[in-house]
Image (spheres, grey):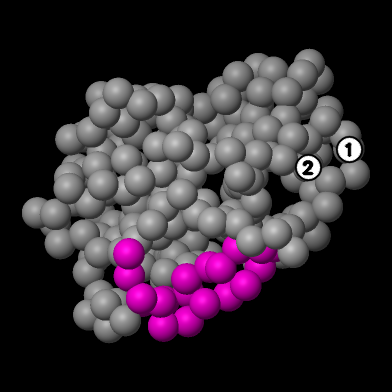
Amino acid sequence: MLKRVSPVDMSLKAERVLARNGWEISLAYAAERRQSALFLTDLSPAPKWTLQGQGLDAIRPAGLSIPEKPGMITLERSLLIVRLLPAECRIMDLGEQTPVFEETGFTDVADAYAAIALVGTRCFDVLAKLSSIDLEGQFSPRAALAPVEDVTCLLVRVEGTGGVPGIILAGARGYGHFFLDALLDAGREYSIQAAGWERFSQWIAGAYTPAAG
């Protein structure tokens, strides 16, 4: 199988690694033995798709509904679906099993985008240093295309286990290390820390909507 390399290099030694779909996913780092309340995780290995065209409301990826309006999200059974435009949505699998889509038209963009989760109550303070978008307010969108510094990317707000907020960022692969450096620099005063997929999974599990039936 072709070896795939994440565009986000944490430069940390992983204590445990999972091989999946050609990726080597860092499950935990030695530095995590002392945990910070604010952490970030490389989500670049997560499967990702785009779906474009008219009639998206009639399509049910893996049996799930696509959100009705731009800025809305669906997060169920580890599958995150973001409605960007009336005729476009993005999909990311945050779990361990890649879904099978019965419909056609899904474009695999797993290798085209870098993705990072920023988790903790200070995530909005970090974002405020880097972007003018407000995802924290009561009437704010759950997702938006917005600049981080000068680079446009997808930003998604999620509340995970214990109601702890987080932001998932996805942008062009070539900017992966730029996003990482910007987040680490902006979060330094809040003792930001890199974390492996296991800690992210514990947090995101609290965000899933139970499957119907």
Image quadrant for the N terminus?
Answer: bottom right
Horizontal and vertical percent for residue 176? Answer: 41, 43
Task: Say the numbered circle drawn on residue 155.
Answer: none
Task: Residue at 46%, 49% (x, y): give it.
Answer: 7
The residue under label 1 is 103
Queried whether the magenta region covers residue 126, the answer comes back as no
Left or right of 165: which side holds 149? Answer: left
The answer to which image quadrant residue 73 occupies is top right
Q: Is residue 84 above or below residue 15?
A: above
Three-letter code for the amino acid on which mark 1 is drawn: Glu
Image quadrant for the C terminus?
Answer: bottom right
Badge 2 element: helix
Three-letter code for the amino acid on which mark 2 is drawn: Pro
Q: Earlier in the sequence, mark 1 or mark 2?
A: 2
Mark 2 surroundings: few (<14), some (14-19) or many (≥20) residues within 10 A:
many
Task: Residue at 43%, 30% (x, y): give it.
Answer: 153
Queried whether the magenta region covers residue 23, the answer comes back as yes
Let me know if residue 168 appears in the view.
no
The residue under label 2 is 61
Horizontal and vertical percent for residue 60? Answer: 80, 39
